[in-house]
Image: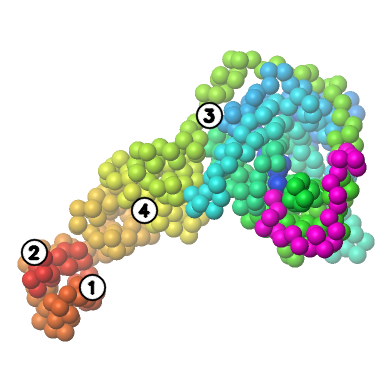
Amino acid sequence: MSQRNPENRPHAPTPEQRSSIILDEVTVVIGLEVHVQLNTAAKLFCGCSTEYGAPPNSQTCPVCVGLPGTLPVLNAKALQLAIKTGIALECEIARHTKWDRKNYFYPDLPKGYQISQFDQPICGPGHLDISDPKGRFEPRCVRIERAHLEEDAGKSIHDETDRKGKSKIDLNRTGTPLLEIVTRPDLRSPAEAKAFLTELKLILSYIDVSDCNMQQGSLRCDGNINLHIPFAGTTIATPIVEIKNMNSFRNAERSLEYEIGRQFQQWQANGLTIDDAPKQTRGWDDSTQTTTLQREKEDSADYRYFPDPDLLPILVSEEQIAEISSQVITLPSAVRKRLQDEFGLNAYDADVIASQGPSLVTYYLAVAAGCGNGKTAANWIGQEVLRHLNEHEWTIDNYPVDALALTQLLTKVSEGELDQTRGKEVLDEMVRSRSSLDAAIETLGIVKVDASELDELCDQLIAENESIISQIREGNTKAVGALIGKARKINPNANPGKVRERLLAKIGIA
């Protein structure tokens, strides 16, 4: 809670003055705390499995449940993944870091404390740049305050059908390695918060430190939000609220949007500021689309941090940092820039490709190089290929049409052997039957229409559609579209572009 300083506080606005202020004049201030489960096979301080979905309490040992006399042993891979994340977020990597005990008493915390990092986190200040290719907000540099390692707690399972309100405890998650990434309060809208989470998840996917599966708890987020309200030449800050249970990026955005309105209405009603009320924790209820009060938020002093006596401090060498840095591949921001600079994509198309992850980027680069047209490759992959992936819940790694086959198809389209519509039909058939390009063309009965067949088709259209021909000759060249539609019914293999070109030539319009 902020220190009260009545002497320097501005004159409090009256209810009438508060009601005259409109929400559009208010600055929204948001900071995020993101918990990321790291991709390790074992827990942070013992050898128990981190695999999801095992029977309750089947992945525990004396160490992770805190039995007396047990000693923790650090999982070195978790430390490496934490450093790798810090490098990707341009954080300062600590050369000396240590472990602390965070003391609190919940039923799913068997030791009565959590092994975490307090004043010497593994990753210090860094930043993450966010932007919106649709231009809904200005690009923003979001400062990372810190990222520290800690072990997860267990899970309380509440039986809502039991009138006695019984709860059960599953300790399988106890000791799972987490990296908590804490931002500065730099975000100014729920849309920016969602964009930050989306970009962070993408980076973590690129560097392979977490699967970020929110449904399985691999990525969890809490939001801290309050309002800065201009009044009489100064700024009034509302009490800070921490929002929990934001189990999707969309719900994170919705909960923050709701909280903006709720806090503003509360301030207009009671005038309470950050100096008048402690920080509180509220939970997002997806069924009612509201936040509900859970408790007053603890301060760091309430946790009584002290160095863990069972774990030695860690020294990180320059050689270790250099080795881990070499494992950080090209990040999404650099991929977007390359797609725009080398392949001529606009910001939106570059974002669509980059946002699908490294495997699809590799697929795109192969197709773009093969067909010689980066925009065409982006259009087909961004529309047709992604449609198939979404429909079948595939990744590009198990997509039945490889980059070479798609390149061959796009070459036929660009050379006029297939029009766009027939090309899409061929791709659909290649996916459906998992067949080659030639086999799909044969299955669909697609044959090349030679010049004499094209002339006969155009002569037939001209003879049978005198009124449309008259419109075209009078200058309404758009009417030729009706003839092209009729041509497709007569001969689906006729290329619409060539039909149009030949029709206009026969009618005498260049």
Which kind of residue does numbered mark 1 sit on? Lys
Query: Which is in the foreground here, disc 3 or disc 1?
Result: 1
Residue tagged 4: 379
Residue 57 visible in image? no
Give the secondary structure at mark 4. Answer: helix
The earlier-in-sequence mark between 1 and 4 is 4
| SS of the residue under disc 2 | helix
Label 3 sits on a secondary structure element that is loop
Q: Disc 2 marks which amino acid?
A: Ala
Identify the residue under disc 2: 451
Give the spatial CA distance, label 1 vs label 2: 24 Å
Say if 466 sits above or below 441 in the image.
below
Q: Earlier in the sequence, mark 2 or mark 4?
A: 4
Cβ atoms at labels 1 and 2 below 8 Å apart: no
| Place of residue 493 in the rendered image (x, y in percent of width and height, measured from the top left) | 20, 66
* Mark 2 and mark 3: Cα distance apart in space: 55 Å
Q: Residues within 10 Å of mark 1 (few under 14, many from 20)?
A: few
- The residue sitting at the front extreme is 232
- The first of marks 2 and 3 along the sequence is 3
* Residue topped by disc 3: 328
* Residue 2 highlighted magenta (yes or no): yes
Confirm or deny contact between disc 2 and disc 4 (CB under 8 A). no
Amino acid of disc 3? Val
Residue at which label 1 appears: 478
Q: Answer with left or right where residue 274 lies relative to residue 345.
A: right
Q: What is the span of residues highlighted in magenta in the rendered image?
A: 1-28
Amino acid type shown at disc 4: Asn
